[in-house]
Image (spheres, helix red, strand yellow):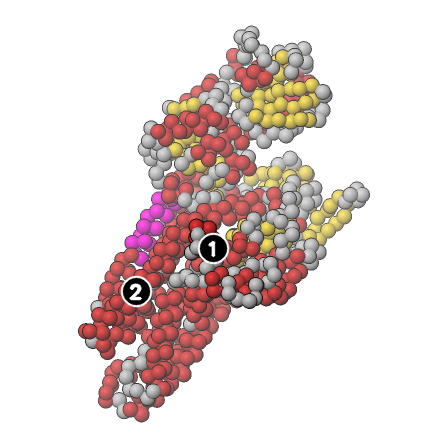
Amino acid sequence: MCCLGCKAAAELITGSGLQQFYQHRQSRDPDAFYARVARADSLAPLAVLAQRWQYLDSVTDADEYLIVDTQGKRTLRLNVAGLYCASCSWLIERTITHQCQSARVHVDVGSGTVTLDVPETETSLALLVAAIAQLGYQPQPAKIGDYASRVAHQRGERLLALKRILVAGLGSMQVMTFAVATYVHGDSLPALYQRYFHLVSLLVATAVVFYSAKPFFSNALRDLQHRRMGMDVPVALAIGAAYASSVYTVLAGNNTHVYFDSAVMFTFFLSLGRFVEMQVRHRVLGAPDEVVGLLPARIRIDRCGASGRVQTLDIQPQQVAVGDRLKLNTNDIVPFDAQVLDGVAQIDESTITGEPDPVVREAGDALSAASRVVSGKVLIESRSGWADSSIARIENLLQSADRHAKEQAHWVETLSHHFVFAILTITVMVGGVWYWLDSTRIFEVCLAMLVASCPCAFSLAAPVARSASIRVLRRLGVLVSNPNALHTVRRVTLWCFDKTGTLTRGRPELVAVQRLSSLTEQQCLAIAASLEQQSDHVLSAAFQGITVSAEATNFYEETGFGVAATVGHQRFYLGQLSWVTSKLALADTSSVALLDDCVHTSIVTLGEAGYGLHAIFYLQDALRATSRDAVNWLTTQQAKTAILSGDRVSSVADVAKNLGVSAYYAQATPEQKVAILNRLHDQGEKVAMLGDGVNDAPVLAAADLSLAMSSGSDLAMSNADIVLLNGSLNQLHNLIAVANKTELITQQNKWWAIAYNGIALPVAAAGLLTPWLAAIGMSLSSLLVVLNTLRISRAVKTHKRSSFSNEDGN
């Protein structure tokens, strides 16, 4: 290199994984390099390929495939054939982000789907899909809500796999029949018979290798093309070497040993093992749109147009708009997030919350999509578009979990690549040793080593267990958005709870109003309701339903303190007494005497700029039915508990006394909460924080483990590692049980993978393991890891029922 600039440029190209630049930089065709690395600019082959999916870039033609949110972000789901392991996921993500850096990619290997979130409207979706196809995969856009097509897609993959297994199984029986005859009779077998057996075995093995083993060769070729040592590289090398050497022996007319039996047996057992593994993964991981599959394919809604006319439309649930209305009868599925306008019904919400008992919903109550009407009739109205719905929010959190998982899985994938390279190196070295010991056995020993070795079991050890635990918890109403949190759960020594909305039900009620000015109580309430209309704080719910005095403008919210807005040309402040008085520059508040009979309530103060204080509102929020049980159970598990709240001391102390919590921190601002948390960290505590409000977001982000209630703010949930969907704190029992079981099974899987390779490879290197027996062992090693993972579901069977407690008392 001529200078440091060239060195830096070379490091940049290599660091970006674009080493192929050096293979094509001398080409006269300026597009040669870009064609190989799937760049969209000036790329004729990719552009031609993209014409097949050109309809995805048309708004009118793609409405059946795209979900577009209010910001214009487009979401497209693809069924992709040929996905197998984390290498496939890595490769697709790298290609898509290379084309569009702002695109978000979610690859679900278990269900064979790829989800693209593209924020820019000018980005061509057709080119992104074509880039995936250019890698050798088979992408097929899936219609929104078309759960049946995705099931059919998986069924088609299973059918193809079964066909390959059938051919390999029949071929194995036939080839082994001839092989056993050769083993038994040996040299006494007439040469003509032996020649016949070899020729028929060649024909049968050819069908097995080129049909049943095709996926192994395709995956290995794809890995090598992208300079990666994938898990199928030694597999393809073993099958190919056994087959090729045997073909040469037969065609050359030699009577030496052939390995057709090893090639077909390896193909059969490995194909069978991966099929069972795929079945279990589909069962354990599930499709991310499993809940969507419960929704009706089409619904007939009443929509009010711009002219005021009501139209009856036949749409998909994903095309719903705010204000759409629908009548539901018994056994109907709620197709979108809605509010009940009229009627009373019993609703089964177990699909979303995991809670088994139906709840009563009537006018004014909210309904979640995928709930079922057990009895009754209701008229509902949509309260959000699909992109802002609870199901879409759950899917986003699950995709967040997948991104966290990929960060952890990256080093496992890297280790697997190094493992494969090491196996190939060791095999060559062992072959050299056998050259001096017994050159006639070199091929047999090396083949057995390639067949026996497999990083699959180690690569699957943690990801499969983690995914299984996430799915089990999801069915119980616990959503894990950061899979690493399951490991953290076991190390938590202190569980900190926010009070309002976490230990309490988050439904504050106004119990008293203390007037401090000439304004009437109704006037004070109307002004407060105007200010709280735009707030997401839990306490704002106490002012819902109160007639506002005027529209609030110039709204401002200071997290953890209060809100301010202009109402009727006057500036008002509503929040903590100390905050309001500081905003109004009131030096002396000693004359404000709080009501004695409301000492344990939360207070909200209303003040006006240039005037002073108008009123103090006293709010009461009842404890959750499960709060006491959860705190008591944590205490029995030798875990410490504490309350960390911004509410006043008397209110927090009362809750702490009722629940038996000895440590509590009151009147803490968001910054003070983080400072308290850091102080606890310095004392050696591993802290789990449970909160639900906007003011809890900073402390949730700072905690070792963060949990949010689903009834809380979006900001709190986005900063939480785990979300409790049904509001039951008893779910902490299931969470800890599943986390402990997951850690145990993960360790078992890892030790099994290490033990298998630690035993199988030396035995194969010593010449004590035949290739066909190595094939069985290699297949079983991965299969046992997956089957062992199924035991995670047993972690919650004994106490699942006790964890469900309806906070409404229904």
Instruction: Give me the disc on residue 650.
Output: none
Residue visible at 65% across and 50% down? Answer: 121
Question: Does the image show residue 471?
Answer: no
The amino acid beneath tag 2 is Thr
Instruction: Give me the disc on residue 425.
Output: 2
Residue visible at 31% across and 90% down? Answer: 193
Camera-nearest residue between 797 and 475: 475
User: Which of the image's four quarters has the N terminus?
Assistant: bottom left
Which residues lie in the magenta part? Answer: 736-753
Q: Position of residue 493 (x, y in %)?
A: 35, 33
Q: Position of residue 309 (x, y in %)?
A: 79, 44
Q: Position of residue 160 (x, y in %)?
A: 49, 70
Task: Single out the mark in the foreground, 1 or 2.
Answer: 1
Q: Is residue 637 left or right of residue 321?
A: left
Q: Picture quarter containing residue 250?
A: bottom left
The amino acid beneath tag 1 is Ile
Q: Secondary structure at mark 1?
A: helix
Question: Does the image show residue 131?
Answer: yes
Asked if 275 appears above or below 800 in the picture, the reply is: below
For disc 1, the marked residue is 13
Residue visible at 46% across and 19% down? Answer: 649
Neighbor class of circle 1 (other Cα within 10 Å; few <14, some 14-19, many 20+) is some
> Any magenta on residue 725?
no
Q: How many marks?
A: 2
User: How far is the residue under mark 1 from the one under mark 2?
Assistant: 28 Å
Main SS of the magenta part reads helix
